[in-house]
Image (cartoon, coloured by chain):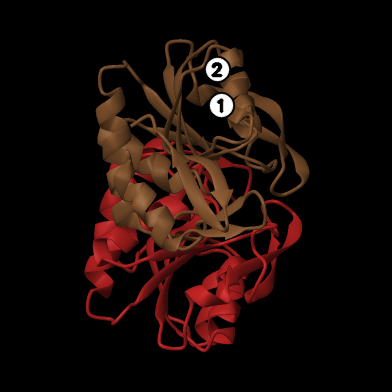
Chain colours: A red, B brown
């Protein structure tokens, strides 16, 4: 997605060897115009895929996911990272290790929101080691539903998330794919859309 | 907001003495159509208030806040509940106690996203004891910016959040105000919009 790549080059900040900070438009401050475009691009790609639900994980996945849901005309569900006293029944869970936050957390979705008739499009802001997506796939599979694909805004292609997911037979569709950081600059490889 | 009150009556679940579960359209599964309407209603109310930025707190505030931001044509910033290794510089923080999750957490916003020229509309999904909003107000005040108002989707008017905020001179605007739960049913009091 050219618009996204341009925005990353303009406003992204490379930190150290493997961190790209996109907190001015995606992960902290959010640009709704870009999110709308992201929603349209994913929806256009998946419009004939029979998707019935968009699933993401809190918190940075929510803004892109809700616009994907809007563009597809579907409900969006965001998985929770912490237990909540109002979540009392029928919870599906998986363990997820976050390399960014350096903690293992339990991710959960109330089972009533995923049925065995669902065909789910997972949306997330970043794909690095694939742990969050793997946890969501685990939950969706527990519910007896199908995962149509994993849609990623920014993929760190130099980490092994895509490989891990593709080995499990999951279709990964990324809007921007970071091949490497060279002299503090992002080098892209061909994106999927 | 009549549409929201009707939705609460239709799909909300009263749990025990003071919990309203709205996880089928707001806090877990999200209905983008309702979020769009919420965005429009807040934007219409605040269109002449000189707002420059919409601020919320992860995670359930993000969906309504991004649609408010879209309707006002402004950026949205969501405060973070946990420290992140990519947040390295100029962070404004406040302590927030969550009665729902029974934990105290540090809430933070990168200072570069709030300037002293900003007039901020805070948006959140729930107002109960007002602790989250109080933390956000603290952060925005630290940045030297002004809080125009706190916009709430669902206010538990039988708890003291509104009183706490109004005592500090903050304008609270809620779309649905829960007066009480009677026999497992929600009783509303007059909403602000």
Q: Between A56 and B152, which is closer to the camera in this rendering?
A: B152
Query: Count the marks: how many?
Result: 2
User: For residue B43, what is the image quadrant?
Assistant: top left
Q: Name the residue under label 1.
A: B162
Q: Is residue A162 shown left or right of residue B119?
A: right
For disc 2, the chain is B
Q: Is residue A159 visible?
A: yes
Q: Is residue A130 visible?
A: no
- Badge 1, how many Cα within 10 Å: few under 14, some, many 20+? many
Q: Between B94 and A12, which is closer to the camera in this rendering?
A: B94
**Callout 2 touching callout 1 (CB < 8 Å):** yes
Circle number at residue B95:
none
User: For residue B64, what is the image quadrant?
Assistant: top left
Q: In this view, does B26 lie above or below B45?
A: below
Q: Is mark 1 on a helix, strand or loop?
A: helix
Q: Quadrant of the C terminus of chain A?
A: bottom left
User: For residue B188, what is the image quadrant?
Assistant: top left
Q: Between A155 and B151, which is closer to the camera in this rendering?
A: B151
Whether discs 2 and 1 lie on one chain: the answer is yes
Q: Between A180 and B154, which is closer to the camera in this rendering?
A: B154
Q: Name the residue under label 2.
A: B166
């Amino acid at each position: 997605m050219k618009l996204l790549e341009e925005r990353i080059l303009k406003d992204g900040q490379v930190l150290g060897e493997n961190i790209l900070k996109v907190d001015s438009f995606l992960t902290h401050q959010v640009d709704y115009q870009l999110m709308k475009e992201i929603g349209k691009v994913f929806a256009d790609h998946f419009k004939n895929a029979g998707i019935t639900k968009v699933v993401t994980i809190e918190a940075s996945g929510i803004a892109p996911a809700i616009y994907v849901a809007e563009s597809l005309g579907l409900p969006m569900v965001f998985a929770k990272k912490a237990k909540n006293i109002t979540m009392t029944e029928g919870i599906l869970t998986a363990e997820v290790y976050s390399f960014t936050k350096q903690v293992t957390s339990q991710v959960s979705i109330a089972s009533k929101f995923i049925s065995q008739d669902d065909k789910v499009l997972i949306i997330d802001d970043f794909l690095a080691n694939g742990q969050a997506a793997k946890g969501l796939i685990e939950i969706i599979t527990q519910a007896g539903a199908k995962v149509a694909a994993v849609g990623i805004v920014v993929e760190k292609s130099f980490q092994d998330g895509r490989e891990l997911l593709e080995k499990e037979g999951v279709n990964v569709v990324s809007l921007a794919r970071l091949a490497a950081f060279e002299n503090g600059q992002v080098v892209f490889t061909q994106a999927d859309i």
